[in-house]
Amino acid sequence: MMLGAKQSKIGQLILVETTVIGTIASVVGAIVGCGLTGSIGALLMQHMLGEKLHHFSAVYGPAVVATIGLYIGLFLVAGVINRLALTKTPVLQLLKGDSQPNRPTLKPVSQILQVVFGLSFLVVGYYAMSHIKQLNLAAIPIALVTIVLGTYFLFNAIFVWLVVLLKRTNWATRGLGNFTLSQLSFRIRNYTKILSIVSILFALALGAITVGIGFNRQIKTMATANSAYSAALVDPSTKTNHLINKLNLATKATYSQKETKSTVYYNAGEFGQHPFQATGLGETTVFDSAKKIKIGNT
């Protein structure tokens, strides 16, 4: 059928096939992922946190839609790239593509350089993530680029080298050893790419779990560090005041203020009656009318 088809038709079939399979895989993956998250994921996070998670939901609609949409977009891009590449490839070469090996050749200098560069990139990436307080948001793109490159270089160098060296040992001549190694070497470079992607996806998943656990543990700290007041209302309406009066409040303070373009003025006498409280990390500072108040700098 391929021998009788036009190049444009072959490219169209490749694009449609890639998109359809990618869409089905994304939907199935999202369903299976939500199922595993609701069962194994909940138990894992409960074990790591040491307490039962309340209101935990394995399905979050916007995340599911965003994930499926992202992967469909990636498969569309891959389909377009494959279409452009395959339409320029002779049909006979396409037919024999699966039977053409991608055998590795051992190049010691190249392999050593890849190991060195891979380790160096990984060190830089993990250093950036461990010093995110100093590097701020710059740590994320640095780690994203260096860890991806480092993972690929390291896997590509080590596994190619390992397969070639194993084929030179006595173990390769025993049983199915030579057959197994030959199958690996047939597509080893493609396998290293897949393995790199899988390891990066695992890292992303663990990173997301770690961020979630970090947010959970920061709840108490953030709640006590923001302000001594759970709510501050400016110019409340009559309806709002009516609703406030129905609340059972531990503390209620009213301060008059006047704003200009660069300054906010308060009545010092009101601070004498109700000292303003600003909460820091683990401590509460009380300001009276005799002290200058700098809101936000505690």
Image (tube, helix red, strand yellow):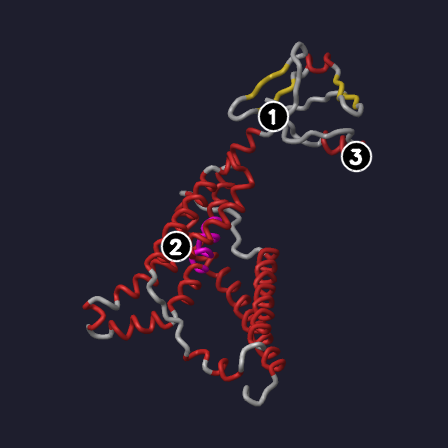
Instruction: Please give the residue where the numbered disc 1 appears in the rendered image.
Output: 228
Q: Is residue 232 magenta?
A: no
Towards the viewer: 264 or 49:
264
Q: CA distance from mark 1 to mark 2?
A: 55 Å
Does the magenta-highlighted stretch encompass residue 199? yes
Question: Is label 2 in a helix, a strand or a loop?
Answer: helix
The prevailing secondary structure element of the residues shown in magenta is helix
Give x and y (percent) for residue 145. Answer: 50, 50
| Residues under numbered marks 3 and 1 in contact, where contact means CB atoms less than 8 Å apart | no
| Element class at badge 1 | loop
Q: Which residue is mark 3?
A: 239
Range covered by the magenta-colored residues: 197-207
* Viewer-nearest of discs 3 and 2: 2
First reached walking from the N terminus: tag 3 or tag 1: 1
Residue annotated with mark 2: 114
Residue 23 occupies which quadrant of the picture? Answer: bottom right
Residue type at mark 2? Gln
Question: The residue under label 3 is which amino acid type?
Answer: Lys
Residue positioned 44% across, 57% down in the render:
39
Front disc: 3 or 1: 1
For the residue carrying disc 1, how many other residues have a C-alpha within 10 Å: few (<14), some (14-19), or many (20+)? some
- Up-down relation of residue 116 to residue 102 (above or below): above
Q: Amino acid at mark 1?
A: Ala
In the displayed structure, would residue 52 be above or below residue 187?
above
Q: For the point 72% across and 13% down, which residue is it?
A: 268
Task: Decide if residue 126 is on the left or right side of residue 61.
Answer: left
Question: Disc 3 and disc 1: Cα gap in Å?
Answer: 24 Å
Judging from the image, what secondary structure is the residue with disc 3 in?
helix
